[in-house]
Amino acid sequence: MTYLWQEEKRKPFWRIQTDEKGIYNKLKRRKSTTLAVWGLNTNLCVFTMEFYSPKEAKTSLGRITGRKVNKDAENDEFYA
């Protein structure tokens, strides 16, 4: 599963968390991402990205994962 959330409201900084090797490899190749967290005993990594709108972030998550993107209204995050 892959999650995307905004670090702080009205700021362009977003984090994307995944436990899938294929998505990790896609994010690692991008120049616009930075690895922020690497799980040692688990298959988890978190990257930072910059998007200037939630719509742009949602579209990008869909392109990265190749899946339909849903929104969790309670936590204010996207997942695919």
Image: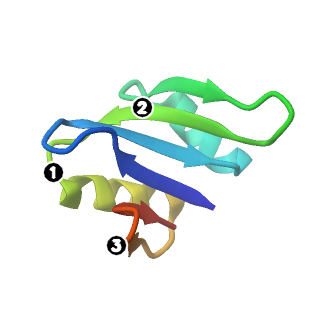
Q: Residues within 10 Å of mark 2 (few under 14, many from 20)?
A: many
Report the amino acid beneath label 1: Ser
The quarter of the picture where the N terminus appears is bottom right
Residue receiving disc 1: 53
Residue displayed at 38% across by 50% down: 5
Q: Residues within 10 Å of mark 1 (few under 14, many from 20)?
A: few
Residue receiving disc 3: 73
Q: Residues within 10 Å of mark 3 (few under 14, many from 20)?
A: few
Q: Position of residue 49 (x, y in %)?
A: 35, 34
Residue displayed at 38% across by 70% down: 74
State how far apart marks 3 and 1 are (Cα). 16 Å
For the residue labelled by badge 2, is the local secondary structure a helix, a strand or a loop?
Answer: strand
Report the amino acid beneath label 2: Thr
The residue lying toward the viewer, choosing from 30 and 54, is 54
For the residue labelled by badge 3, is the local secondary structure a helix, a strand or a loop?
Answer: loop
Residue displayed at 19% across by 45% down: 9
The residue lying toward the viewer, choosing from 46 and 22, is 46
The residue lying toward the viewer, choosing from 49 and 9, is 9
Report the amino acid beneath label 3: Ala
Give the foreground label among 3 and 1: 3
Does residue 44 sit above or below 33 in this rendering? below
Indicate which disc residue 19 carries.
none
Classify residue 42 as left or right of residue 12: right
Classify residue 74 as left or right of residue 64: left
Residue receiving disc 2: 48
N-term mark: 3 or 1: 1
For the residue labelled by badge 1, is the local secondary structure a helix, a strand or a loop?
Answer: loop
Does residue 45 sit above or below 72 in this rendering? above
State how far apart marks 2 and 1 are (Cα). 15 Å
